[in-house]
């Protein structure tokens, strides 16, 4: 059986590496996208179990991407983890995302969370 797919949309190279590694250790096949416009173009062709979504992205913001994800019924069972350093934005998005994490986010925190979101084999 192939690994479940996770998409990390994060423009900070260090954070995207940490998030990718944490999801990989949790058993996911991971794709990283560092630009909002690229993510918007890629979304129609992916079927992710988990999407880790930064809000402050170049070209297309994460809140716009979140709207697209929520409007696409292919993502009805996808767990969206929004990440932001802005506590005000985090509070505003609590009802729109499955999980909202305020940065800094540790490797272990995301690994453990991703492990719980991984579908049973």
Image: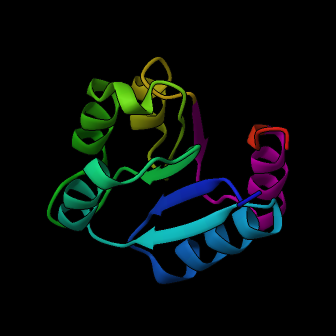
Instruction: Please give left or right for residue 68 compared with residue 90 in the image.
Output: left
Residue 16 image position (x, y, % from top left): 53, 73
Instruction: Please give left or right for residue 115 compared with residue 14 in the image.
Output: right
Seen at 46% across and 47% down, the residue is 47
Seen at 26% across and 31% down, the residue is 67
Residue extending farthest top: 95
Residue extending farthest front: 1
Q: Is residue 10 in the magenta section? A: no
Q: Is residue 23 above or below residue 86?
A: below
Which quadrant of the view contains residue 88?
A: top left
Residue 9 image position (x, y, % from top left): 42, 61
Q: State the quadrant of the N terminus.
A: bottom right
Instruction: Please give left or right for residue 59 compared with residue 77 in the image.
Output: left
Q: Is residue 84 above or below residue 15?
A: above
- Which region is colored magenta? 99-116
Seen at 47% across and 17% down, the residue is 95
Residue 92 image position (x, y, % from top left): 39, 24
Question: In this figure, what is the number of numbered marks?
Answer: 0
Which quadrant of the view contains residue 14?
A: bottom right
Residue 116 image position (x, y, % from top left): 83, 39
Here the colouring is: rainbow
Q: State the quadrant of the C terminus.
A: top right
């Amino acid at each position: 059986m192939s690994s479940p797919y996770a998409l990390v949309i994060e423009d900070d190279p260090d954070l995207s590496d940490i998030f990718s590694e944490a999801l990989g250790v949790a058993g996911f096949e991971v794709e990283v996208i560092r630009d909002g416009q690229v993510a918007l173009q890629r979304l129609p062709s992916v079927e992710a179990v988990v999407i880790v979504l930064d809000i402050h992205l170049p070209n297309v913001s994460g809140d716009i991407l979140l709207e697209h994800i929520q409007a696409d019924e292919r993502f009805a069972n996808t767990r969206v983890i929004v990440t932001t350093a802005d506590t005000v934005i985090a509070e505003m998005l609590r009802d729109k995302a499955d999980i909202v994490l305020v940065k800094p986010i540790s490797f272990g925190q995301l690994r453990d969370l991703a492990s719980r979101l991984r579908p049973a084999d």
